[in-house]
Image (cartoon, rainbow, N blue to C red):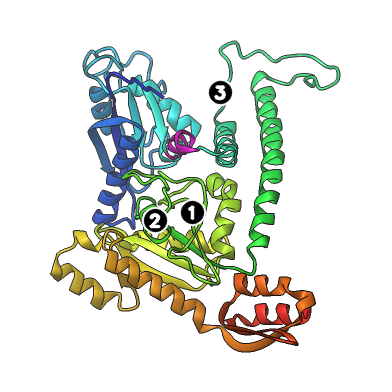
Amino acid sequence: MPDNRSERARAVLIGVQLPGVSDPEFASSLHELERLARTLGLDVVGRVTQKRGALAAAAVLGEGKLRELARLTGGTGRTGRQDEEESPAEEPAQAGTAGHPSVVLVDHEITPSQARNLERATGVEVLDRSAVILAIFQRHARSREARLQVEIARLAYLAPRLRESSGGFDRQGGGIGGRGAGESAIELDRRKLRDRIAELRAELAAIEREAGTRRRRRGDQQTVALVGYTNAGKSSWMRALTGSGVHVADALFATLDTTVRALQPETLPRILISDTVGFIKKLPHDLVASFRSTLDEAREAGLLIHVVDASDPAFPAQIEVTRRVLAEVGAAESPLILLLNKADRLDSATRERLAAEWPDALLLSARAPQDVALLRERLLAFFERGMEEVELVVPYAKQRLVGEAHAAARVLSETHDAQGTHLRLRARPEVIARLRSAL
């Protein structure tokens, strides 16, 4: 994809409004694609939209709209399927040159043949929505785990889109690990991709086992996962609740790596907060599959905080997207607090309306200290709700259990006599059972 650091590349958006998609939903989806483009460093200089019963099988758009798009990019408007003697309506300028966009972004997932036909018609690179999201993930991935996850998804996306070389000859060969008789160049390339994906998955599985071990070690601890649409403000809340220096940016998919930090001021037992990758409409399935281990933080958390950008008019649809992804990773039934974020951007009338429409939600801002304190109290109250109060006597020969009690329970009092250490504590039933079994 073009990436001119001195001058931002230009892009044109394509959107087809299909049956069942309302005007606001269609406009919101295109606006989101424009934000994705800006995240990639592209300036959107035009849009070509059309209402159709389905995407045109050849090149997404009808012939008239395709010519309109070609005039913007400097292309011919011809897909290669038209009569070779047919001339374009007007002589096109050289595609992709100064003054013309160098990339077309399609707000749909398109087939390889549709992409090729669009490229022939426009003379510039064509990326569908999945390719744009994958490019952003690839740019923002920092940890080894995130890079592996993105690379697996990228190769899985690329495999069916490989094109034959210009020669088009079958390669003949044999030997150990060699090509089978008559195996074409594209078949060989696809086999290499499958082998590479298998290698990456094996490496990722080793990392996932380590991550699973860390999660099991936190099994007795109280955990909260921040989930929600991309750029809803999860990282801002992570920083506000834990005082950590996690990366915060007004950009889509700024966070891809899961971060776990303790709630501050620290409580006994500790409450651990994890920040997770954001979701988006039409998130490529391969990305969800690759990031499943990262999203396990959400599935195994004791409580989910679903962060929503309440200042975005499209937030109800974003809530549904998040709910669908949570269901896909097995977290649909987890306890959840709905947090309508960025309340500081709302006027009083909007706040009152949202409070009436979403009575069970918290309408807060990560920038307001009193709101951060309120959410912290809600977290403490949630985990206190399932606790029981008991007294235990720990013999001096087993004093290590005193430390475990302080780590996993709230110790209300601690006294000592000839029998040992007397603890009065509040803890979850499973923690109490584990401590009693160790006495």
Number of the front mark, 3 or 1: 1
Which contiguous range is marked in magenta?
A: 133-141
Residue type, numbered disc 1: Thr
User: Where is residue 173 shown, x and y percent of the image?
Assistant: 79, 14
Residue 60 drawn at (x, y percent):
37, 36
The dot on residue 276 is 1
Residue at point 35% right, 78% down?
A: 360
Gap in Å between the C-alphas at discs 2 and 1? Answer: 8 Å
63 w.r.t. 76: above or below: below
Report which residue position mark 3 lands on. Answer: 163
- Between residues 196 and 306, which one lies in front from this camera angle? 306
Q: Check if mark 2's residue and mark 1's residue have beta carbons within 8 Å.
A: yes
Mark seen at residue 234: 2
Q: Is residue 135 magenta?
A: yes
The quarter of the picture where residue 130 lies is top left
Q: Secondary structure at mark 1?
A: loop
- Which is nearer the eye, 187 or 3? 3
Mark found first going from the N terminus, 3 or 1: 3
As displayed, is residue 332 above or below residue 68?
below
Please name which of the two marks, 2 or 3, marks the residue nearer to the observer.
2
Which one is earlier in the sequence, the residue at label 2 or at label 3?
Answer: 3
